[in-house]
């Protein structure tokens, strides 16, 4: 995660500025975003459980997709999370496939 | 287009040659130095390494590849390569080769596969097509099985014979894409009447196979 931190010696690191804004992401380059869970959809694709989690920050929203999972403990509506992975473009905005996640308090 | 082919066996090498000759930027990956050394195709880049490892895929340039084709002779490897290509590099199109048809059910979105190509399945379809007149032959699936290409050769007694394409009453989810008649391909204009022996190629989406059978084959056929 450290590679994404833009440390400034003269000012303390502000949480929000550590992660790039969703609207500024470049598709297909590995990144981490921080945002709030605003929607959770369980939608089987071809009979496979699929969890779609919409994550929003001040600039926009992206979707994290976990295949083969029905739920992730602690990943609930309103929760702030950090999602780390490779975003890809899709019809509904950027998508992260099976990203790493960190639940923030 | 930038295409990465994992597996430099006869299939991979053939694909590399074909795709490169049509002006694509092709990279072949194989962990076997012997297989790599047999690649002697102008314009094709080779990467020696295990394509099941992120580092190798990265070295081959997966992060800006348009297509990754996993065509090794090992289904497990093909699945791992597909998943990594999709998950770690967000490759827009991942094509995987199915060696053992028993494994075909796994080659789907779950493993990052956009298109699964099963040689045994294709062979079966081709044989079916050669021997069956008056039945629906599934040729290929797209969009994770949501759309498929199928073919019907019109047998005597088909209700479609003598009917114009526009009047067939095919469901909306179906498109006639070509008519093969006496070795020629006819473009499927609405006012072409169908003849006995015509091979009708249709693109189907959704669950309309039964309707297509009814229209092109009739009720008696399976």
Image: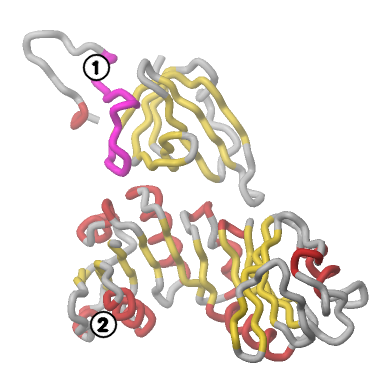
Position of residue A22 measured from the top left corner of the image (x, y, whole percent)? 34, 26
Q: Secondary structure at mark 2?
A: helix
In the image, taking residue A25 as reference, residue A46 lies left or right, namely: right
Q: Are marks 2 and 1 in contact (CB under 8 Å)?
A: no
Using the image, name the chain to which the residue with label 2 belongs: B
B19 versus B208 height, above or below: below
Q: Quadrant of residue A9?
A: top left
At a point 34% along the width and 82% down the height, the residue shown is B14
Residue B11 sits inside the magenta stretch: no
Q: Secondary structure at mark 1?
A: helix
Residue corresponding to mark 2: B35
Q: Quadrant of residue A98?
A: top left
At a point 30% along the width and 75% down the height, the residue shown is B22
Using the image, name the chain to which the residue with label 1 belongs: A
Q: Nearer the viewer, residue B65 or B174?
A: B174
B177 versus A57 height, above or below: below
Tell me if mark 1 has few (under 14), some (14-19) or many (20+) residues whose alpha carbon lies within 10 angstroms of its own. Answer: few
At a point 60% along the width and 77% down the height, the residue shown is B121
A21 versus B41 height, above or below: above
> Which residue range is magenta in the image?
A15-30
Residue corresponding to mark 1: A17
Q: Quadrant of the N terminus of chain A?
A: top left
Q: Nearer the viewer, residue B148 or A10?
A: B148
Position of residue B159 measured from the top left corner of the image (x, y, whole percent)? 87, 75
Residue reaching furthest to the left: A10
């Amino acid at each position: 995660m450290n590679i994404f931190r833009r440390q400034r010696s003269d000012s303390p690191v502000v949480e929000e500025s550590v992660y790039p804004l969703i609207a500024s992401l470049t598709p297909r380059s590995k990144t981490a975003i921080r945002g709030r869970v605003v929607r959770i959809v369980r939608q089987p694709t071809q009979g496979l459980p699929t969890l779609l989690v919409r994550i929003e920050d001040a600039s926009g929203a992206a979707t994290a997709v976990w295949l083969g999972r029905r739920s992730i403990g602690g990943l609930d509506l309103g929760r702030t999370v950090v999602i780390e992975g490779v975003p890809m473009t899709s019809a509904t905005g950027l998508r992260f496939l099976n990203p790493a996640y960190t639940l923030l308090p | 287009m930038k295409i990465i082919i994992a597996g430099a066996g006869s299939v991979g090498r053939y694909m590399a040659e074909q795709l490169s000759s049509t002006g694509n930027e092709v990279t072949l990956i194989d962990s076997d130095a012997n297989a790599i050394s047999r690649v002697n195709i102008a314009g094709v880049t080779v990467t020696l390494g295990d394509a099941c490892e992120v580092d190798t895929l990265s070295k081959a340039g997966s992060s800006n590849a348009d297509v990754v084709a996993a065509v090794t002779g090992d289904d497990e490897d093909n699945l791992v390569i597909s998943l990594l290509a999709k998950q770690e590099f967000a490759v827009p199109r991942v094509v995987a080769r199915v060696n053992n048809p028993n494994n075909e059910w796994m080659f789907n979105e779950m493993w990052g596969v956009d298109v699964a190509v099963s040689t045994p399945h294709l062979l079966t379809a081709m044989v079916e097509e050669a021997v069956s007149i008056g039945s629906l032959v599934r040729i290929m699936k797209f969009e994770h099985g949501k759309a498929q290409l199928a073919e019907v050769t019109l047998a005597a007694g088909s209700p479609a014979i003598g009917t114009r394409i526009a009047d067939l009453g095919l469901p909306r989810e179906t498109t006639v894409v070509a008519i093969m008649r006496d070795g020629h391909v006819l473009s499927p204009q609405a006012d072409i009447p169908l003849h006995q022996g015509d091979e009708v190629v249709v693109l189907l989406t959704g669950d309309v196979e039964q309707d297509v059978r009814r229209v092109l084959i009739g009720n008696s056929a399976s």
